[in-house]
Image: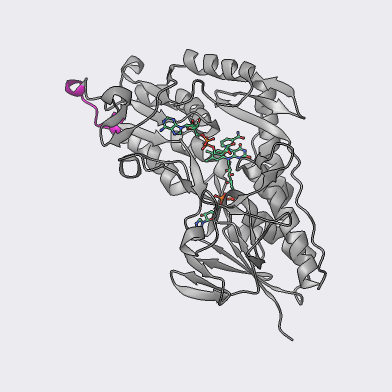
Amino acid sequence: NHKPKIVVLGAGYAGMITTRRLVKKLGPEEAEITLVNKHNYHHITTWLHEVAAGTMSQNQARIMISDIISEKRVSLVYDTVQKVNKEEKQVILDNGVLEYDYLVFALGFEKATFGIPGLDEHSFSISSIDSSREIYHHIEYQFATYRSENENSGKLNIIVGGSGFTGIEFLGELADSIPKLCKKFDIDRRKVRIINVEMAPTILPGFDEELIDYTKNNLKIRGIEFLTNTKIEECSSDGIKIAGNQEIKAGTIVWTGGVQGSSVLTASNFNVFKGKVNVNDDLRMPEDENIFVLGDCAWVTNKELNKPYPPTAQIATQEAETCAENLKFLIRGETRLKEFNFSDKGVVVSLGGGDACGTIFSNTKLYGKTARAMKNVIDNRYLLMLGGPALVLKKGKFTMF
Ligand code: FAD
Ligand code: NAD
């Protein structure tokens, strides 16, 4: 009478929601559930740019996993996954080995630097609580140690590489926090340059043109400089190089130029395409039907456009619902699994300063305070899903009109 073992790797959007749903759907006698995560907290990735700019405290952006998931039903293991050995059905951790019957692989994203020299060593990335708070502390240190004799060193300059949604949301927060830091350290705001470098002809490539204009104007007025059509070709400790060997000096370089799936995928010898697993319609790995791959580690095809959906928290949480349902079917011996269908709720980009813009319900455009209020609704809805009304009251965002 073997009780099946379900092991969930990663307590991000996909891993947390899968685990919460499994606890609801399955009785304690039906399966043993284990959740593995590097830290004892779940971080709200979609708020990390605020931690990085110093506009949100790190504690606001994290939630203790044991506050959300009952240890009576789920074994919580705080350790780092090194690799999965699918032949033996084992997960190799830094400090042990776990056996599984069904695995949910949801270890999320890492920064992708595309082999650009110096980027790995000399740029920061917004990918975890640790990496985000490091950015703010680094910027603060540059300001605290600035002396006027260093006027041409570029020490106060901040380069943000890439203007996808992460770069833009981070710039919006910097536009709020840098004037405050200038005040704190008696520095003239005009001495600080915040420069966004984007290789495409426009910021937010592929986004709606009116929303791009709105975003650009908003951020320009608040002191952000944009260099489009400009590729970062090299990075060093004191700046970047762009075409023509031209140098731009900076004391802080934050790379928001791209993400890739967890490197544990390749360490586990999984069949990956461009760093992620192309999953079946039921979210399982084609080569091993006991493994589900979710969130930023999986490619799910948008069949209408015949290209993969972009990696978002929105799709990761929806995948988690389908995955938990399919695990219930498997545990109960049903062979027909549910097909994953993404329901796109739109995109809202926060711009800091109580402003935002975006599109919802296919093509309704929102701007300003209305968009900001909608962004709060989206954030609070996730908290409600995760931990009910108590979590919304504790961590939620509310708009003051
Ligand atoms: P993650 O959220 O990355 O979680 C992975 C988890 O696994 C983490 O807890 C991590 O600590 C853990 N982990 C990783 N490696 C290991 C290991 N080896 N061992 C043990 N544990 C490990 N998407 C939206 O839909 N809307 C937004 O507004 C939005 N804003 C964003 C803002 C920012 C600044 C960023 C960076 C991204 C944003 N995204 C947004 C994208 C979204 O955050 C990701 O798509 C989402 O986090 C993916 O969820 P996930 O569950 O796959 O992984
Ligand atoms: P991204 O891949 O979307 O954007 C990276 C940007 O960097 C691109 O515009 C690219 O042209 C540019 N770039 C790449 N190499 C460069 C180089 N060498 N020099 C200059 N520019 C370069 O990455 P992201 O912004 O981190 O977003 C990751 C995922 O997270 C996306 O799927 C996004 O939709 C999602 N996200 C969503 C939200 C939201 O919904 N509000 C917010 C943040 C992130």
| Residue 378 percent across, percent down from the top left | 69, 37
Q: Between residues 284 and 370, which one lies in front from this camera angle?
A: 284
Residue 177 in view, yes or no: yes
User: How many circles with numbers are drawn on the protein?
Assistant: 0
| Residue 219 percent across, percent down from the top left | 50, 18
Q: Residue at the spot x=46%, y=36% of the render? A: 256
| Residue 371 percent across, percent down from the top left | 67, 25
Q: Residue at the spot x=44%, y=42% of the render? A: 132
Question: From what the image shows, is residue 64 above or below residue 287?
Answer: above
81 with respect to 115 (left or right)? right
Q: Which colour scheme is used?
A: one colour
Q: Residue at the spot x=76%, y=47% of the render? A: 341
Q: Does the magenta stretch include residue 148?
A: yes
269 with respect to 293 (left or right)? left
In the rendered image, the residue lying farthest to the front is 306
Question: From what the image shows, is residue 375 above or below residue 300?
Answer: above
Q: Residue at the spot x=77%, y=60% of the render? A: 325
| Residue 374 percent across, percent down from the top left | 70, 29
Q: In which quarter of the image is the C terminus?
A: top right
Q: Quadrant of the N terminus?
A: bottom right
Question: From what the image shows, is residue 159 above or below residue 367?
Answer: below
Q: Which SS type dominates the magenta stretch?
A: helix
Q: Is residue 362 magenta?
A: no
In the rendered image, the residue lying farthest to the bottom is 1
Residue 401 in view, yes or no: no
**Image quadrant in which you'd find residue 338:** bottom right
251 with respect to 173 (left or right)? left
Question: From what the image shows, is residue 97 above or below residue 218?
Answer: below
Q: Bounds of the magenta span?
A: 142-150
